[in-house]
Amino acid sequence: MRQSLNQSVVDCYSFKSHISFKTNPQFCLTFFSALKDLLNQTMTSFTITTVPTKPFEGQKPGTSGLRKPVKTFIQKDYSENFIQAILDAAQDKTKLVIGGDGRYHNKTVVQTIVQMCAANNVKHVIVGQNGILSTPAVSAVIRKRQTNGGIILTASHNPGGPNGDFGIKFNTSNGGPAPESVTNHIYELSKDLTQYKIVNELTVDVLTLGVQTYNISGNVFTVEIIDSVEDYLGLMREIFDFNTIKSYLSSGSLKILIDAMNGVMGPYVKRILIEELGAPTDSAVRCESLEDFGGHHPDPNLTYAADLVKQLESGVYGFGAAFDGDGDRNMILGKNAFFVTPSDSLAVLADNLDCIPYFKIGGVKGFARSMPTAGAVDLVAKKINKEIFETPTGWKFFGNLMDAQKCSLCGEESFGTGSDHIREKDGLWAVLAWLSVLANTKISVEELLINHWNKYGRNFFTRYDYENCEANPCNEMMTQLETLLSQTDFVGNTFKSGEKEYKVLIADDFSYKDPIDGSLTTKQGIRIIFSDGSRIIFRLSGTGSQGATIRLYVDCYESDSSKFRTDAQQVLRPLIDIALQISKLKEFTGRDAPTVIT
Ligand code: G16
């Protein structure tokens, strides 16, 4: 009886049976009223507590959610305040998804969110088993189960553990990170909070799959625990031709090595790549999800995924990939650790979308990239006559374009690639997309890139990160750059480094007017664009948890095929020197060298 009641409640919220809210609202209202009576007769009622609180400073979401050291989040009422601000900002919150990347503090906050949802009139929460869902999986679940949004617990690529970082992020009903209008609203609410509501006595069993029904002060509240991988796997099956990938992997033509970096991706890699697609069990490493990511920095780049790079250098593997803590980023390597820049990865996929059934059948609408991402994909868009959009850094800016059917594929230099199947970037999707291209073309990663450059020319790209600098000097450096660029004679100036000379064509602070809702986002990175198309860009990261991180992005275009195989650092050296000279970065930060180069 209890079980069938639970299932009926889920059906009502899920719009999936003949007794759904959508098809038969009157029946559902009567049903819930009867259920309420039954609950009041048979189940203990939990009471809602209103807790007085004081606002915390700085609960302003950054590029993607609120990210702070664990030590900040474990302060009394800190998480509760931010969750209350999210719940207050959410216009409709009948049904929400909850899940995180499993980092330290995940388990505690999952329970807190459930307790607060129960107290704040949320009717139904869907929780990944043991509180685990990758960021792309949350987006997939929100969309598949038509929820009003979700709360994701992650600090993405930032280190975890008691001395690492934690984060809370709100995604809206399209499955994507909340747009700035919503995050600004959350921040404003957080500044004036005087109380939050919680059901302290409620502790849900997050390990057992299925539905739990609770009586919260006489109202029905249901918690549905779902398998962390199932919905996402179902979506991947719809997008890709699993048989083609499977037979290519089993043909022995391609040996792969996947590094899950001890983040959330372990179970996804094992289930999808190994169990479903038949990759040998030793083709995935670091698949055990750990609260501190094994003490590593779960960031898939050449510095923090150095182990994978080393393995690929051996020449044994033809394809390698790594993910970040929450599974939305990816790094792609070919044999001998041939590095595919994220800008090139996006362009190569754009040029080969007919290898993927989702695009072959559904067609390709357009493309988008973040401003600092090199323009390799622009050249593909031009050739195949598709629209291309240049957005600020942050996946949230792609959501509107996708919802308006203007963009099918997008990517960022920060190791993000994805499509309109969800509204987050998607690490494993990118790997499956690459495997689809390799299985169809049957050539190596390096050959694919060389062919691509021969067809379009090569966009050389590098990014220098100066992590954890003192904030004030970095802000001063950016202000100084803005002042310099605003001088009337800056455009037209020439800068020399060695033999190379560059003339400034455009100098500005990037701003973006959303073509769909008209919203304007300013100060998104200082750009110096030279007359040959080369670019130098400076930004302060919006994902760090303390101090400041300066990102310097440099790119140039080369059409001479004899230069395609030159090392990117060598090609870009003159531009990097000019960037350091113009910005006086060393004088401001005291840093001689970046912490990470990609
Ligand atoms: C987030 C955003 C990305 C952005 C990246 C870097 O990724 O979702 O869109 O490119 O941060 O941002 P920043 O340069 O401001 O540090 P993730 O993987 O951290 O969620």
Image (spheres, rainbow, N blue to C red):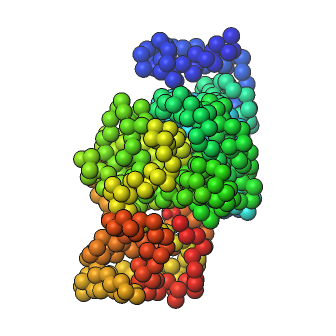
Q: Is residue 63 visible?
A: no
Q: Residue at x 65, y 24 (%)?
A: 211
Give the number of callouts. Answer: 0
- Quarter in which the N terminus is drawn: top right
Q: Is residue 352 above or below residue 230?
A: below
Between residue 192 and residue 167, name the one nearer to us: 167
Q: Residue 387 in the image: x percent, y percent?
A: 27, 49
Judging depth in this view, the residue of 273 and 449 nearest the camera is 449
Residue 283, given in percent of the width and then of the height, sits at: 68, 43
Task: Name the image quarter holding residue 59.
Answer: bottom right
Q: Residue at x 48, y 45 (%)?
A: 443
Q: Nearer the viewer, residue 57 or 230?
A: 230
Q: What residue is shown at x 68% (from left), y 15% (from top)?
A: 3
Quadrant of res 66: bottom right
* Residue 308 place in picture, x, y as percent: 66, 56
Whether residue 21 is visible here, answered yes or no, is: yes
Residue drawn at x 74%, y 36% is 203
Percent of width and height locating residue 246: 57, 32
Q: Quadrant of residue 581?
A: bottom left
Q: Is residue 438 left or right of residue 372?
A: right
